[in-house]
Image (tube, rainbow, N blue to C red):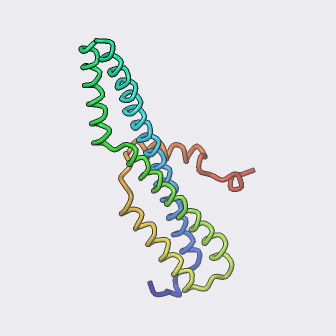
């Protein structure tokens, strides 16, 4: 982006605020997705371990019908876990959430420190270009979160969960 003398630091700052807001919502939505997929991982994994142990005991205690039924349940739970990969999905969403919040923090520091302290126009454009590029790359590389994850994130943000104490009115 070539520097345009008609665009002010104020306008660049507003665009950085938009990036920050996008990152807050996306990051929190990814953290909600991480939490949800982590629950799925445990909901599938813990019963599979328990039922597998009980099935083994049932076979040793000469209860083949019980052992067979529990083995079938374990097979279904294990297949679901293999197919859905909840642990991998949770980890991916956690990583994306961390990256969005990192971008948000970097954009905020640039906006409040560099931009407000007589940053030259070309440096301001370069910074904005960097943050825009990072956000676009994150949007393309990140897994999709659900609408429910986003709605929960927005409600939490509106309730003040994402605000720093220093930014809250006294």
Q: What is the number of callouts on the image?
A: 0
Q: Is 117 situated above or below 94?
A: below
Q: State the residue at coordinates (54%, 69%).
A: 16
- 21 vs 86, left or right, is right
Could you tell me residue 125's position as x and y percent? 52, 81
Please tell me which residue lies in front, 27 or 85.
85
Q: State the residue at coordinates (56%, 80%).
A: 124
Please tell me which residue lies in front, 77 or 8.
77
Could you tell me residue 14's position as x and y percent? 55, 69
Could you tell me residue 107's position as x and y percent? 56, 68
Could you tell me residue 64's position as x and y percent? 25, 15
Q: State the residue at coordinates (62%, 52%).
A: 163
Assign the N terminus to one quadrant of the image.
bottom left
- 125 vs 92, left or right, is right
Residue 78 falls in image quadrant? top left
Kindly give the residue lying farthest to the top in the view shown: 62
- 52 vs 108, left or right, is left
Q: Is 141 situated above or below 74?
A: below
């Amino acid at each position: 982006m070539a520097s345009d003398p008609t665009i002010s630091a104020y306008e660049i700052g507003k665009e950085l605020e938009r990036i920050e807001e996008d990152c807050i919502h996306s990051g929190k939505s990814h953290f909600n997705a991480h939490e949800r997929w982590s629950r799925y991982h445990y909901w599938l994994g813990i019963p599979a371990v328990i039922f597998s142990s009980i099935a083994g005991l049932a076979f040793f205690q000469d209860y083949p019908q019980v052992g067979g039924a529990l083995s079938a349940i374990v097979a279904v739970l294990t297949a679901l876990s293999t197919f859905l990969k909840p642990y991998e999905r949770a980890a991916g969403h956690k990583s994306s959430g961390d990256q969005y919040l990192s971008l948000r923090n970097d954009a905020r520091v640039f906006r409040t420190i560099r931009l407000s302290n007589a940053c030259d126009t070309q440096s301001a454009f370069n910074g904005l270009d960097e943050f825009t590029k990072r956000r676009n790359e994150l949007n393309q590389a990140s897994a999709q979160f659900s609408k429910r994850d986003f709605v929960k994130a927005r409600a939490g943000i509106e309730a003040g969960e994402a605000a720093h104490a220093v930014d809250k009115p006294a």
